[in-house]
Amino acid sequence: MLQLIDLFIDQGFATHFASTASRSDYSDELSTHGVECHDIKLNDSSFDYFLKELDPIVVMFDRFMTEEQFGWRVAEQCPDAIRILDTEDLHSLRYTRQKRFKEGVPFRPESMFQEEITKRELAAIYRSDLSLMISTYEMDLLQKIFQIPEYNLCYLPFLFDPISDSNAENWHSYDDRSGFIMIGNFLHEPNRDAVKWLKSEIWPLIRSKLPAVEMNIYGAYAAQNELQMENRKEGFRLHGRAEKVKQVISKSRVMLAPLRFGAGLKGKLFDAMLCGTPSVTTSIGAEGISDSKNWCGTVWDSALSFAEAAIELYKNADKWKIAQKRCSEIINGGFLVQDYSPEFNNKLNDLIENRVDHRRSQFIGSMLMHHTMASSRFMSKWIEEKNKGM
């Protein structure tokens, strides 16, 4: 989100951030980025007045649930505003993979058709003028399986400045690092499952060969039963929230990310690459980033292969150094801001200039917006009136 905000600011937009969420001690101070923040309410006509006064040229929704809540209001109050959906990752993909995994059934993309969340998310994509996709896999999925037109989508992954040779030279060396690390918010189901799998099957195999090495897990919001997985004698440590993420990653020798379901790009693996920390992950973890042959470490989907690869990468300095070099190669080869921001800016400017022609070619989107305004609008108005009486 911060990267997207910077793209708008760099293009000269006065940028506003409106949210229904309460601010916390961990909220980013967006004003330092030149962003004006606003508190808004769900199912409340005060948002209409706020929107009318602001009169935006472009409105971006953070994930499809936000578009469901506010998209019809934007279309009603500011019909000329370009509506962009930031999918973050394809939620219907992650949900279906998780469901099939728990059912013990292999995932097939066609199975997404059965899920209500798929219909909701695709409807939000059709209603929007443009949807931002973070993963090449998800771009292909939407176009090939769901027949979403390419002009409705824009591939915009995580964006970084180039990692220069001098930057890489400042990374901690193999000998300066110790221990394995995993990072992940425990409110996120793929992370919870990964920690449980790591604890029950993978770590015992690693620990048997590396009895003096520790597994350090950082993640906020762990429940009591998850905190109870910590076992100091086994070197399995849970530390809670990492106050300085890059610092703890930089001191670790290998990042582990045993993700068995999920979607989008995995921020923890990019954090590891930016710190020059090799990783062992699964095909789900590497998806949309790089193929297994060119990974900055190794990619395996079975517990035994995963553990053996982690042990080898941890012990073998030569392989570790090769993997570290690939960290910068992956970032510089496919995730540089200079490679994607011009295309995004051109696409956005074209939408602003040719909004009428663009929307004329999107009959499905206009039809879905019509029915949304006829249903969600009155449901929201009913909830607003009900809240007034409470």
Image: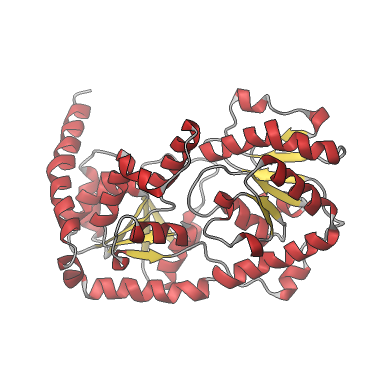
Q: Return the x and y of residue 170 as percentages of the image width and height.
A: 77, 66
- Dividing the picture into quarters, in which one does residue 14 lie? bottom left
Q: Is residue 52 left or right of residue 14?
A: left
- Dividing the picture into quarters, in which one does residue 380 lie? top left
From this view, report whether residue 249 is shown above or below residue 276: above
The residue shown at (78%, 54%) is 313
Q: Return the x and y of residue 356 as percentages of the image width and height.
A: 16, 70
The residue shown at (56%, 42%) is 260
- Using the rendered image of the protein, determine whether residue 351 is visible from the camera's viewpoint: yes
Q: Nearer the viewer, residue 248 or 21?
A: 248
Q: Is residue 204 left or right of residue 344?
A: right
Q: Is residue 32 left or right of residue 227?
A: left
Q: Nearer the viewer, residue 200 or 273?
A: 200
Q: Quadrant of the C terminus?
A: top left
Q: Return the x and y of residue 199 as percentages of the image width and height.
A: 69, 33
From this view, report whether residue 312 is shown above or below residue 350: above
Q: Is residue 210 left or right of residue 6?
A: right
The residue shown at (43%, 76%) is 342
State how many labels appear: 0
Q: Nearer the viewer, residue 322 or 335?
A: 322
From this view, report whether residue 117 is shown above or below residue 285: above
Q: Return the x and y of residue 267 as percentages of the image width and height.
A: 57, 53
Q: Nearer the viewer, residue 46 or 234?
A: 234
State how the image is colored: secondary structure
- Using the rendered image of the protein, determine whether residue 188 is visible from the camera's viewpoint: no
The residue shown at (74%, 55%) is 250
